[in-house]
Amino acid sequence: MMDLSSDVGGPGLPLLDYKTYAERIFFPGQQIAPLSRQLDLPESRRQTVEQGLQQLNNLLNNRLFLTRFIHTLEAQQGFSQRDRGYVASLLTIALHDKLEYFTEVMKTLLQDLVQQYVAKNPKLMLRRTETVVEKMLTNWMSICLYSFLKEVAGEPLYMLYRAIKYQVDKGPVDAVTGKAKRTLNDSHLLREDIDYSAMTLNVLVKNGVEVQPCPVKILDTDTITQVKDKILDQVYRGAPFSQRPAADSLDLEWRSGQAGHLTLSDEDVTAVVHGRWKRLNTLQHYKVPDGATVALIPRFHSSGVNQVFQTGEKTPMLEGEEEEGLRLWHLVKSSEDPEIPKHRKSSMRERERAKAIPEIYLTRLLSMKGTLQKFVDDVFVAILSTKRPPPIAVRFFFDFLDDMAEKHGIDDPETVHIWKTNSLPLRFWVNILKNPQFVLDVQVTDSIDAVLSVIAQTFIDSCTTSEHKVGRDSPVNKLLYAREIPRYKQLVERYYSDIHSTASGCYQEMNSTLTELSGSFASEMNSLVALHELYKYINKYYDQIIMSLEEDTSGSGVPVVVYLKRERRSCGLIELIDVKNNQRSVFYAQTVGSGPEEKLTNK
């Protein structure tokens, strides 16, 4: 495992570019995110629509309008949780070139949120993403911490990912259920004793004109797809996942002697069928010997490079994959899973046995944990160390939370600790720990995901203030990290208190950072598509938005003039709101003259 460091020094970290990173965090799981789309319009209408969207962009720069717009949407019954996250991300893209303004709006909305929670239960604030502003905060943290990931946390995260992958691949992994012999996750543990042997295949790799054999370690119980994946891992070692061919675009050929070429696959006419069960083919099935020579050759209908959006995640095959009424299995038949007792009314002895199972396997989980310990520690320390100054955004935001607590008379340190945990570790870091594919160009298989979930849960447990007590009935992951969690808790406590003592007065520094970030990445944001998507919501809830603006009583009894587009010698919308008489007029106006007496004429 230690030779991973030479890889990191070689081709470098497979860090995602900013646009892909933003796309995966702002729109997780979406096949085509608004950042990758173009505005789909007939040429005859393009100019008019783009002009209109530009005016909408100007309108979003009016804080009164934007906050009313968000609150109005949130008050609608049909505006779902999914819509809230989507609108927040569309606004993030639309305002990405004005991050100072975006931050101010976010703070205004958060002040409203604090007001709501203080009246109910302040400890629950920011716990989930139930409002637009909570997703805005996640996106804001992600924008501000990208350079920290690049310079500080990315490398230990990649090392952890590689170490997990290396360890998981050393033991059998069931291709149908996703369960593995080597894991940290007891619910993903392959509990049966599987006979397996490690083997080395000589893979013929074309290097320019020459064909050279490359040794690759695999297991005789691996399915053919698993073998192809391990070969690709070795041959394309250090290359970003998206730049290597997909396993299903290649065939695995076993070569023996001059004429012996046999194409191996997971399912073919040689597959073993017993009753309604069909077993996936493995190297053992084909009797491929240790040291055999194989080659990966392009399949006739190849799908080319990995086009899988987001992760190239490999979820295991569906357990009930019906094919002519047959069920697929690899290492264990899923219905014979020992975790699920065959009869609910099992005897006391069987129930005791079921309860004791995790303890029997705890040793195996602990050995995996011990091997990964250094890598887990390195990631946690990189995230929570104050040896180098913590990111300015973290100091700025924690200071804002301290101010909010003071303003509302909250003197319970536990509440403020929970707010900080919910806004940074829970909202940002856990997301990254569970999904390294949001930052790195790697493939997260189901068995790697299971291990990362336990590590992410340990990180969450380390950020709580309650004492970490474990007993016989504690979840297995809590037993696994029982000795480490108190140490991690101290790291978190020190991180929060160090920031508290140095945070104040960083507003100016924050603003210049935001200005810099706005300029760096704004060109990569497809703001027109985001504005077009936002317009659909305005259109859908048009009457409610207008009514909400008319009801706004935030004026002081004098007419309020809002300049939506104010350029000398140009046209624009001008909105007059007479708060006293609750009258509102909109003019399409043109400026005349250029001196202090310039007049506005209603066109």
Image (cartoon, grey):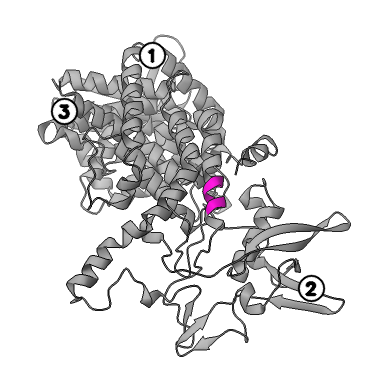
Q: Is residue 300 left or right of residue 62?
A: right
Q: Which residue is mark 2?
A: 255
Q: Which numbered disc flags the more N-terminal residue, 3 or 1?
A: 1
Q: Amino acid at mark 3?
A: Thr
Give the residue drawn at x 66%, y 78%. 286
Based on the picture, tell me whether residue 166 belongs to the magenta stretch: yes
Q: Position of residue 411 (x, y in %)?
A: 15, 20
Q: Which mark is residue 553?
A: 3
Give the residue drawn at x 55%, y 37%. 18
Q: Which numbered disc flags the more N-terminal residue, 2 or 3?
A: 2
Q: Which residue is mark 1?
A: 506
Q: Which numbered disc flags the more N-terminal residue, 1 or 2?
A: 2
Q: Quadrant of the N terminus?
A: top right
How much space separates mark 2 and mark 3, taking CA atoms? 81 Å
Q: Position of residue 587 (x, y in %)?
A: 33, 31
Q: Secondary structure at mark 3?
A: loop
Q: Secondary structure at mark 1?
A: loop
Q: Is residue 421 left or right of residue 330?
A: left
Which is more foreground, mark 3 or mark 1? 1
How much space separates mark 3 and mark 1, taking CA atoms? 34 Å
Q: Amino acid at mark 2?
A: Arg
Count of picture labels? 3
